[in-house]
Amino acid sequence: MNVEELMTRNVRTCGPEDRLSVAAQIMWERDCRCVPVIESANGAARVVGMLTDRDVCMAAYTQGRQLADITVRSVMAKEVRACRCTDSIDTAVRMLEENQVHRLPVLDQADHLIGLLSLADIAGEAAREHAQGRKDVTDAQIAEALEAITQPRQPGALATTAA
């Protein structure tokens, strides 16, 4: 099974100069916890960051400012881990585990954003398969991924936000 089969399409994005209030509105309206940050250069858009609901909340709390006064660029995760639509689900799960993230932007061969894959998407597939007696995605695989993702990060590990 490939990423393309499970990913969420038509993902809303924001730009690095947008305000956190814009990103928060997208998250509210789309009932999502993450927004890819896109920057256009030479007519092509590329993913330059990821912003989570936690990033938004922590920025507002630690800075003591309104969301409309804080730019996305100032709090987005700048080290983006992404997968390809042709990658296997096993490959994507390993990436989630290794990078301790819940979601990966999905890129086409030209590095354009075409979707988002979350651990929840994969867990939903495991549940569907369980009901059908198939086991392409196992419960153990989901449990191991969740355990790896939720482990406390070691000092010096990949940061999720940058000030």
Image (spheres, rainbow, N blue to C red):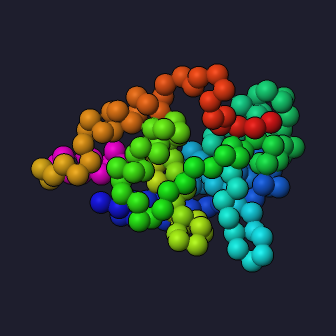
Quarter of the image where one finds residue 16: bottom right
Residue 134: percent from left, percent from top: 16, 52
Seen as rendered, the residue at the extreme left is 133
Residue 14: percent from left, percent from top: 71, 58
- In the image, what residue occupies the spot 70% across and 61% down? 38
Of residues 118 and 66, the one drawn nearer to the viewer in this rendering: 118
Question: Is 47 placed above or below 23 here?
Answer: below
Relative to 7, is 64 on the left or the right?
right
Residue 144: percent from left, percent from top: 35, 33
Quarter of the image where one finds residue 160: top right
Residue 18 visible to the viewer: yes
Please state, as top left, top right, bottom left or bottom right, where the C terminus lies in the image. top right
Q: Main secondary structure of the magenta part?
A: helix
Magenta segment, which residues?
120-131
Relative to 53, is 6 on the left or the right?
left
- In the image, what residue occupies the spot 66% across and 26% down? 156
What is the tally of numbered marks visible in this picture? 0
Please state, as top left, top right, bottom left or bottom right, where the N terminus lies in the image. bottom left
Q: Is residue 15 magenta?
A: no
Relative to 20, is 109 on the left or the right?
left
- In the image, what residue occupies the spot 45% across and 64% down? 85
